[in-house]
Image (cartoon, rainbow, N blue to C red):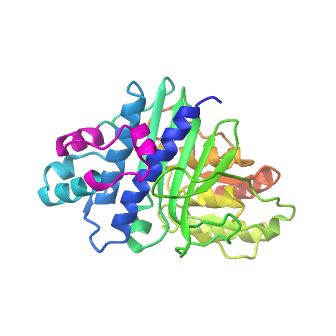
Amino acid sequence: MAYEKELLIAQLAVQRAVILTSVVFNSKVRGTVNKSDRSPVTIGDFGAQALIISALKANFPQDEIVAEEESSKLAENETLRKQVWDLVREVKLDDDASEEALGGAVKTEEDMLKLIDMGKSNGGAKGRIWAIDPIDGTKGFLRGGQYAVCLALIVDGDVKVGVLGCPNLPVEDSAPMTADVSSDSGVLFAASQGQGSISRTITTGALSPARSISMRPLTDISKAAFCESVESGHSAHDEQAIISQRLGITAPSVRMDSQAKYASIARGAGDIYLRLPTSKTYEEKIWDHASGCLIVKEAGGVVTDANGKELDFGIGKTLKANKGVVGAPRNVQAEVLKVVQAVLAERAS
């Protein structure tokens, strides 16, 4: 199978990173600072990124990496740096063979800082590039809601491998879509191009058995369940409500943070993912969509922008050629897009 090793390492790397983020999530000390755009970053973000990049560099040393975080905030904050290092030093998989496959532990605090800063690729249409979001949905993470650890391999602008670690989604794929944290939670989602999508229960050691997942059949669009962002700054909620009404959908939208939305519709817990543009200038980041987009596609869905164009992951760090994101079962995508485009045109007039 093509990209078999990449898929294995990506799943193990994300699972190990989830262990670290879960420690932070369940503790009272989140260790948060604000980046230049005022968005929050936590010790969990820094630690997870260091562990993932460590595994990638041990196994694929020539590959480029584009990641959301950089280490300057740690370099100037000794207390924060020590918190992250304590996590990175202590977290490992219980299964020795799996830990060895990842390349083992990060050796020093200095190495940790260097690893975090190895995610500075500008992306592009050539070569092998890994996209990392160590904690997608940081605000959800901080409020005790949904978040995801995200990793994707993009080759010559095409997403080949995608993995999402969703520690707070219910284990059962048949569970109803919810933004609440399940008592029986922790799911690893993965896809390799042309090989379908799977889910696994997250463990602290070796990978658990895989289950094939797919979008649920949708013959009556009025029965669909929408999934959208919690933050109104990430998706236009008013337009979303109008779109639901025009499609005859009466069920309230489920709002949750992160690419857990992609995972939810991919396994049939929901049906339609909308992320409508909130401004003419905002550009979506590739690490916010690459993994989820592939997982939905391999589960039988379609993901485009609001104009029906394929998402272009080969331009750079952003989806600058696209506006908005729409994911849905293949048989209703055109109907959803028609309404989306009409509503957005009305807003623009």
User: In front: 314, or 83?
Assistant: 83
Please tell me in which quadrant of the rendered image residue 155 appears. Answer: top right
207 left or right of 20 in image = right
Q: Classify residue 112 by image quadrant.
A: top left
Q: Residue 93 magenta-drawn?
A: yes
Q: Residue at x 23, y 38 (%)?
A: 114
* Location of the C terminus (image quadrant): bottom right
Where residue 332 appears, as percent x and y from the top left, is: 80, 54
* Magenta stretch, residue numbers: 89-117
Where 202 falls versus 105 (above or below)? below
Residue 281 visible, this orientation: no
**For residue 335, what is the image quadrant?**
bottom right
User: In front here: 258 or 51?
Assistant: 51
The answer to whether residue 49 is above or below residue 246 is above
Q: Position of residue 328 (x, y in %)?
A: 72, 54
Residue 243 visible in the picture: yes
Left or right for 347, reference 31: right
Position of residue 162 measured from the top left corner of the image (x, y, whole percent): 56, 43
User: Looking at this view, is 103 or 194 the one in front?
Assistant: 103
In the foreground, 58 or 235:
58
Quarter of the N terminus within the rendering: top right
> As displayed, is residue 73 above or below residue 253?
above
Q: Is residue 190 above or below residue 166?
A: above
